[in-house]
Image (spheres, grey):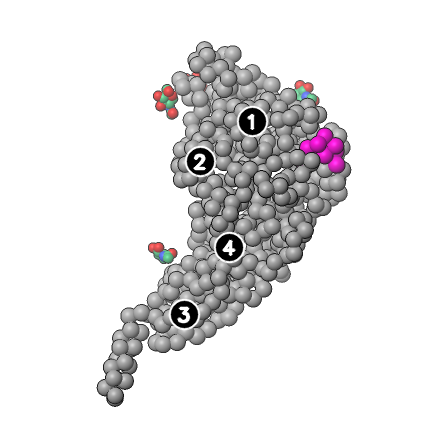
């Protein structure tokens, strides 16, 4: 008998030397990919519906980082969005090689005069395949503004824009020279086939901007195998971001309708959104009549920030929405910088995810406004976090259910974080982890021999990307952590890290 007990002790000691004891039971995440996916969204009666006839009204956030982020950051974004009543977001535009964007980071890098087409950066489109694939996995729908506007100066040319397309297409050496060409009516930029004999081979599709659209919508996703123009992951294709004629007018209706027709010929079941932002204080002058009357244009939107100047005043949202609806069209608040009235869709500017190297991506918008993170912290835990973040996130999340007539569920339970050991600048050991979506805080646990015990009940990862290091001062052999929801429910454990 004695020898059996002794043997058991020896065995358990051996076991603890080579492997950690089992972790205590914990909760399940509510952010796993959903089993059922939503099909194409339909716009009718000035609203949005999924294929089962249910309303697809959403309140979420823009995700301008998506097309350029690390895959972990994309997945964290999708997990974060998945928790809303309807999971929708809006990416930034395809990038064009330009003053701030090297060809290696652009989707469109040059005009090739011998092929009569643009040169596309396949690596950037493979990255986009990854975004589409993760969005599909988490049943998140995306609005993609296809190209950026020319903001009138190179200082604000953040992503490359249509002026860069003119520059490349006409082989111009400066931005100034592009001003001689009218993007909205220039035959080469829209209908260049008249100038290009090889276009006889493809008389329908060959013109400069439409070529970019054709390339995008005929692309087959290298991960999912789904053709972009047939992928219900797109809620809408938007003609562009903040398209604007001469500073205070929407994009010309004739242009928008022509682009819409082309998009619909390649993606008949995806919604088309007029990406105009007129910056005009008068509702009737902010939307192009020809587009409002066109059967090819489904959605209209506007961007609101603050209460002045009048062109951005959020108090016009009801007038704008009623005007668009009077044409039987659906109105979306494409960007807003506060909590707006209910329209069939609204997206706050903007969401940022956990960073691949620990902490969060952060982004300042100026005027003391910063991007938001889930579930939100107020007062701001660090300088680059917004003072209103917690309210903005909680109100938006709550609204995303109320708009559908659904009760607000318990706060999402985070997924498993990924834990790692690193060394700080002094060479001391510390912990760093890839965060868990919607974790309000983490619990850090440690084990030496047989039992796990809680080392710290409230650990935060609210740091700028790469700045998170949790100093390790424990004699424990193993550590692990788990995220805790804003409602106090623990999610799954991270991997176990061996400290010593
Ligand atoms: C430009 O087009 C020609 C003819 O199709 C092709 O051979 C060449 O590889 C293209 N160049 C680039 C940079 O794509
Ligand atoms: C573009 O312009 C440069 C000079 O500015 C010239 O050397 C080059 O041949 C031009 N390329 C084409 C395709 O016309
Ligand atoms: C826009 O500006 C251009 C150039 O200044 C001008 O020719 C054109 O008439 C303007 N269009 C409208 C609709 O105001
Ligand atoms: C931990 O960090 C090392 C480099 O510091 C890296 O090679 C490894 O992949 C990381 N492990 C995890 C699980 O992230």
SS of the residue under disc 3 = loop
- Numbered circle sitting on residue 264: 1
Q: Is residue 15 left or right of residue 43?
A: left
Q: Earlier in the sequence, mark 4 or mark 1?
A: 4
Task: Give coordinates of residue 118: x percent, y percent.
Answer: 45, 24
Q: Earlier in the sequence, mark 1 or mark 3?
A: 3
The span from disc 4 to disc 3 (Cα, nearest Å) is 21 Å
The span from disc 1 to disc 3 (Cα, nearest Å) is 54 Å
Q: Where the N terminus falls, by quadrant?
A: bottom left
Q: Say which residue label 3 marks.
A: 23
SS of the residue under disc 2 = loop
Crowd tier of the residue under label 1, counting other residues whose Cα lies within 10 Å: few below 14, some 14–19, many 20 or above: some
For image coordinates 45% across by 69% down, the residue present is 25
Q: Quadrant of ligand 4?
A: bottom left
Ligand 4 has an atom within 8 Å of the beta carbon of the residue at disc 4: no
Task: Give coordinates of residue 303: x percent, y percent.
Answer: 66, 39
The span from disc 2 to disc 4 (Cα, nearest Å) is 24 Å
Q: Say which residue label 4 marks.
A: 31
Q: Say which residue label 2 marks.
A: 226
For image coordinates 56% across by 16% down, the residue present is 187
SS of the residue under disc 4 = loop
Task: Give coordinates of residue 489: x percent, y percent.
Answer: 54, 65
Instruction: Point out the stretch of residues depicted in magenta.
Output: 322-330
């Amino acid at each position: 008998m004695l020898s059996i007990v002794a043997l058991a002790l020896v065995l358990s000691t051996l076991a603890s030397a080579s492997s950690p004891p089992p972790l205590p039971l914990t909760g399940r995440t509510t952010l796993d990919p959903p089993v059922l996916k939503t099909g194409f969204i339909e716009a009718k009666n000035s609203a949005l519906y999924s294929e089962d006839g249910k309303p697809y009204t959403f309140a979420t956030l823009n995700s301008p980082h998506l097309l350029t982020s690390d895959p972990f950051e994309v997945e964290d974004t999708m997990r974060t969005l998945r928790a809303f009543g309807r999971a929708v977001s809006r990416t930034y535009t395809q990038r064009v090689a330009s003053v701030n964007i090297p060809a290696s980071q652009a989707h469109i890098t040059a005009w090739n005069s011998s092929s009569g087409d643009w040169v596309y950066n396949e690596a950037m489109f493979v990255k986009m395949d990854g975004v589409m694939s993760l969005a599909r996995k988490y049943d998140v729908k995306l609005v993609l503004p296809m190209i950026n506007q020319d903001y009138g100066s190179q200082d604000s040319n953040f992503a490359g824009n249509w002026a860069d397309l003119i520059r490349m297409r006409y082989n111009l050496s400066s931005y100034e020279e592009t001003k001689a060409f009218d993007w909205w009516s220039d035959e080469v930029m829209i209908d260049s086939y008249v100038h290009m004999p090889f276009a006889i081979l493809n008389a329908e599709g060959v013109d400069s901007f439409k070529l970019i659209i054709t390339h995008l919508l005929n692309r087959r996703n290298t991960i999912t195998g789904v053709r972009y123009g047939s992928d219900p992951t797109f809620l809408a294709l938007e003609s562009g971001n903040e398209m604007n004629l001469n500073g205070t007018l929407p994009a010309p209706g004739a242009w928008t309708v022509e682009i819409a027709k082309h998009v619909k010929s390649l993606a008949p079941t995806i919604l088309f959104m007029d990406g105009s932002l007129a910056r005009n204080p008068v509702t009737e002058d902010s939307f192009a009549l020809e587009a409002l009357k066109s059967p090819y244009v489904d959605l209209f939107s506007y961007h609101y920030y603050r209460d002045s100047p009048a062109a951005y005043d959020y108090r016009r949202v009801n007038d704008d929405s009623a005007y668009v609806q009077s044409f039987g069209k659906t109105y979306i608040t494409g960007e807003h910088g506060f909590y707006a009235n209910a329209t069939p869709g609204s997206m706050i500017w903007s969401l940022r995810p956990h960073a691949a190297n620990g902490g969060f991506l952060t982004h300042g918008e100026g005027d003391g406004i910063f991007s938001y993170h889930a579930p939100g912290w107020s007062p701001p835990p660090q300088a680059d976090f917004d003072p209103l973040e917690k309210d903005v996130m909680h109100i938006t999340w709550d609204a995303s259910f109320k708009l559908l007539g659904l009760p607000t569920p318990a706060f999402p339970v985070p997924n498993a974080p990924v834990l790692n050991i690193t060394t700080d600048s002094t060479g001391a050991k510390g912990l760093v982890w890839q965060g868990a979506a919607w974790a309000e805080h983490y619990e850090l646990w440690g084990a030496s021999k047989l039992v796990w015990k809680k080392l710290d009940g409230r650990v935060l990862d609210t740091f700028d990307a790469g700045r998170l290091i949790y100093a390790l001062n424990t004699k424990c052999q193993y550590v692990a952590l788990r995220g805790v929801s804003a409602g106090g429910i623990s999610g799954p454990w991270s991997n176990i890290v061996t400290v010593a």
